[in-house]
Amino acid sequence: MESITSYMEQDHVLIDGFAARAVTAAGAGDWGAMQREGGEFLQRLRRHIEMEEDVLFPAFEERTGMRGGGPSQQMRVEHEQMQPILAAMEQAAGAQDGAGFRRATQQLLDILQPHNVKEEQMMYPMLDQAVGDDAQALLRDVKAMAV
Ligand SMILES: [Fe+2]
Ligand SMILES: [Fe+2]
């Protein structure tokens, strides 16, 4: 059976691919590709964060009683730190500002990469452990939200 860890890890990889292609396009001055790949990145990352905050983290918090001070709270704080940078990426893409887009994306990745490692190595495995057989129902809810 599929674990929450493996599904969400795959989503990280998929989302990272859009960022990499958008940065390449920005460097090449290909604004159409920068906007398309960057737009997909933003939409998919925002949806991924909603899957976590609206479905997965509440299930974890309910099962474990860990809320403030727990790992899901720390992940929520990091999501909040990403928000202004996502807005800067969107703004730069809209303005066809390739240098600004690459700078903002690098800032975002400086937070997102260690964030994803923490989720993959700690948050998701703890989630799978905490929810047991309910993982399948949670995955159905998460997949229904997929872009
Ligand atoms: Fe996250
Ligand atoms: Fe994640």
Image (tube, helix red, strand yellow):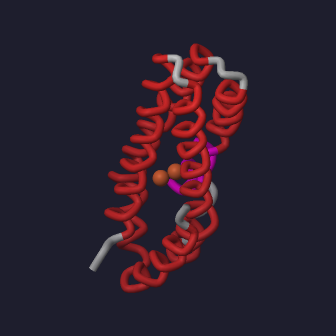
- Look at 52% across and 71% down and name the residue there: 142
Q: Main secondary structure of the magenta part?
A: helix
Side of 5 relative to 55 (left or right): left
Can you see residue 61? no
Percent x, y of residue 54: 63, 66
Does the magenta-highlighted stretch encompass residue 72?
yes
| Residue 38 position by quadrant | top right
Is 9 rendered above or below residue 108?
A: below
Quarter the C terminus occupies: bottom right
Can you see residue 7? yes
Q: Nearer the viewer, residue 53 or 27?
A: 27
Q: Which stretch did the figure color magenta? A: 69-79
Q: Nearer the viewer, residue 110 or 122?
A: 110
Quarter the N terminus occupies: bottom left
Does the magenta-highlighted stretch encompass residue 12?
no
Percent x, y of residue 52: 55, 61
Side of 81 relative to 41 (left or right): right
Q: Residue lying furthest top in this view?
A: 99
Side of 45 relative to 128 (left or right): right
Q: Nearer the viewer, residue 140 or 68?
A: 140
- Look at 55% across and 52% down and name the residue there: 44
- Look at 36% across and 53% down and name the residue there: 120
Is 86 rendered above or below residue 139?
A: above
Percent x, y of residue 14: 40, 50
Q: Residue lying furthest left in this view?
A: 1
| Residue 141 position by quadrant | bottom right
The total number of labels drawn is 0
- Look at 46% across and 41% down and name the residue there: 18
